[in-house]
Amino acid sequence: MEIYLDNSSTTKPCSEAVNAAILSMKENWGNPSSLHRLGFNADRAVEEARQIVADSLFADKNEIFFTSCGTESNNTAIIGAVNSLKKRGNRIVTTSIEHPSVLNTMRRLEDEGFEVIYLKPDQSGVISENDIFEAVNNKTILVSMMYVNNEMGYILPLEVCKRAIKAASSPALLHCDAVQAYGKLPVKLKNSGIDLLSISGHKIHAPKGIGALYIRNGVHIKPYLSGGGQEKGMRSGTENVPFISALGAAVKALPDIKKQLEKTKELSEYTREILIKSGFVKINSKTDALPYILNISVPGYRSETLLHFLESRDIFVSSGSACSKGKGSYVLSEFGLSKDMVDSALRISFSRFNTKDDADKLLLALKEAVNTLRRSY
Ligand code: PLP
């Protein structure tokens, strides 16, 4: 049987999500903008899903806008915010460990003349409070910080950003890429100081190609797409009703987040322990990281070689993030890992469907790998 330990790349759609998408395509395929009954039914399905997503974030229904993915949510939030506030300043603050959908958007904005400050993890592997306070000034128009880093599981200090923005009397909006946190950590938006927040369906057992952006009531950003004015003008384009319904169903099917976090913590700690005991595995993720993500290295063995060996045993993990497609991870380098550790890194990422048995089989296969494969360096 396949052992899937690559859930931060994507998750298997849950049966609730699959059924909702199929039902929508078979029976509820109208255009939500149509004025007849078929349109009305499709619109109702979209609004039901919007309410479910809003409730899961402790947000209002009118603060949720559906997009095609986390990448689109990040682009819309960042470009929209900057275009709305550019008269008030020129500085953007972000981190050097963001996902490419944030970093490459920042590079585009630098080309347009914005000043972008990239905060780096310090020697202890954290983005320091001091650095955040120093970076945010009264000309800062956007702070964009991810909730959880997708490769290390590091939980970033968002609450410090909120205080730094206030202390600097800055007009900045606070954007958060919560793609790896949503559904795994309790994310409560009311009074959080977060103005914009991105989520993605395929990390929580909904299909690929659906995401959402939270825009706090009272915050106005310029839309990224223009067209027929769907999503209250924020995201033109006929709504992807089947996948919106599937997202709603996947969110509804999420287990109690705190209880599941505890279970995953137990599984992650167990995995850590048995891997450390093996003597040939080093753990890169800190103990206070999100337990769903465990980054390890097997020094002397290349990530990709290990990945394919594990694959031959029907065990699926990731080398760096899925987006880096085999390139050495810039994120791990930013965390100060040596080249050997980066080149031999694997990311194990859990979902609620993984068990200790999966961890045992991973260890057995890794043992077999180091006994079979020749060291690469
Ligand atoms: N942000 C983070 C932290 C991610 O891990 C990912 C995907 O891996 C994304 C954004 C992009 O999401 P999507 O694949 O839905 O575009």
Image: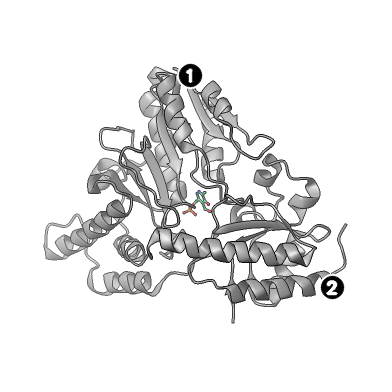
Q: Name the residue nearer the viewer: 220 or 35.
A: 220
Q: CA distance from mark 1 to mark 2?
A: 55 Å
Q: Which mark is residue 262?
A: none
Q: Position of residue 331 (x, y in %)?
A: 65, 44
Is 208 rendered above or below residue 107?
Answer: below
Q: Is residue 78 above or below residue 1?
A: above
Q: Position of residue 108 (x, y in %)?
A: 53, 33
Q: Measuring 39% from the left and 28% from the top, which residue is drawn there? A: 83
Compared with 178, 247 (above or below) is below
Q: Quadrant of residue 29?
A: bottom left
Counting from the top left corner in percent of width and height, residue 240 is at 32, 59
Classify mark 1: helix, strand or loop: loop
Q: Residue under circle 1? A: 137
The 10 Å Cα crowd at callout 2, few under 14, some 14 to 19, many 20 or more, is: few
Q: Does ligand 1 reach within 8 Å of label 1's beta carbon? A: no
Q: Earlier in the sequence, mark 1 or mark 2?
A: 1
According to the picture, the residue beneath numbered tag 2 turns out to be 371
Kind of residue sitting beneath label 1:
Asn
Helix, strand or loop at label 2? It is helix
On the image, the x and y values in percent for residue 292 come to 54, 59
> Does residue 6 appear left or right of residue 190 in this picture?
right
Work out whether residue 126 can be spotted: yes
